[in-house]
Image: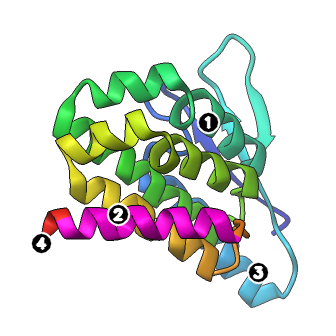
């Protein structure tokens, strides 16, 4: 086996919108690499347009992150749904961790921008804290975990900011 592919057949869901994509695609890739000892290419095939497009999973995850998760318009739209919108954002950040672990497809840029978009951006952070502080807390936890696992190397200053927000939210939750 040299290649593992996932076909996207609906515009409703993209590579970072469901946990199944990293579970199946990443799990199969990991199993094949464990058994064979060889690296396997992972490909995301988008069949939702007029022309089918095949991309590496890394390209697909980074494109999805820029188009949705890090897109200010998408962020505002999600947070306009209050508690549920913040929960949906949190789930997608958790899915990034799954992709990082199983598909090895999340760039440091994406982690950095997630921190900037949801934790360091005061307006977004406060809206998440107001609607769903548990989601904000979980996003901070996932960022820490990405750092601990070696998927992301943030600056000490950024880690200090994350810690400050984590403590503020924990105090609110207690």
Q: Are marks 1 and 4 in contact (CB under 8 Å)?
A: no
Q: Secondary structure at mark 3?
A: helix
The Cα atoms of the two marked residues, 1 and 2, are separated by 21 Å
Q: Which residue is denoted by mark 2 in the rendering?
A: 138
Mark in the foreground, 3 or 4: 4
Q: Is residue 51 left or right of residue 124?
A: right
Question: Which residue, as the protein is rendered here, is positioned at the far left?
Answer: 174
Queried whether the magenta region covers residue 100, the answer comes back as no
Measured along the vertical axis of the image, is residue 106 above or below residue 7? below
Q: Which residue is denoted by mark 1 in the rendering?
A: 64
Pointer 1 or 4: first along the chain? 1
Measured along the vertical axis of the image, is residue 51 above or below residue 75? above
Queried whether the magenta region covers residue 160, the answer comes back as yes
Residue 57 can be seen in this image: yes
Q: Please give the name of the residue rendered at 27% of the width and 62% of the height, measured from the top-left corner.
A: 169
Task: Give the tally of numbered discs.
Answer: 4
The Cα atoms of the two marked residues, 3 and 4, are separated by 44 Å
Mark in the foreground, 3 or 1: 1
Instruction: Point out the image quarter for the N terminus.
Output: bottom right
Q: Secondary structure at mark 4?
A: loop
Q: Are marks 3 and 2 in contact (CB under 8 Å)?
A: no
Q: Secondary structure at mark 1?
A: helix
Pointer 1 or 2: first along the chain? 1
Q: Please give the name of the residue rendered at 52% of the width and 73% of the height, measured from the top-left corner.
A: 144
Q: Which residue is denoted by mark 3 in the rendering?
A: 33
Q: Please give the name of the residue rendered at 76% of the width and 80% of the height, measured from the top-left corner.
A: 33
Pointer 3 or 4: first along the chain? 3
The Cα atoms of the two marked residues, 1 and 4, are separated by 35 Å
Residue 92 % position (x, y): 44, 49
Pointer 3 or 1: first along the chain? 3
Q: Secondary structure at mark 2?
A: helix
């Amino acid at each position: 086996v040299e290649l593992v592919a996932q076909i996207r057949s609906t515009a409703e869901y993209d590579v970072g919108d469901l946990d199944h994509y990293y579970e199946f695609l990443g799990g199969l890739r990991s199993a094949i690499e464990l058994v064979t000892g060889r690296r396997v290419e992972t490909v995301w095939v988008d069949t939702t347009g007029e022309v089918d497009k095949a991309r590496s999973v890394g390209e697909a995850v980074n494109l999805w992150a820029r188009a949705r998760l890090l897109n200010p318009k998408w962020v505002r739209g999600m947070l306009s749904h209050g508690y549920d919108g913040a929960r949906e954002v949190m789930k997608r950040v958790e899915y990034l961790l799954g992709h990082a672990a199983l598909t090895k497809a999340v760039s440091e840029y994406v982690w950095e921008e997630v921190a900037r978009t949801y934790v360091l951006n005061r307006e977004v952070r406060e809206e998440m804290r107001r609607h769903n502080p548990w989601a904000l807390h979980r996003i901070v936890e996932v960022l820490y975990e990405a750092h601990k696992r070696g998927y992301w190397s943030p600056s000490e200053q950024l880690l200090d900011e994350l810690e400050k927000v984590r403590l503020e939210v924990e105090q609110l939750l207690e």
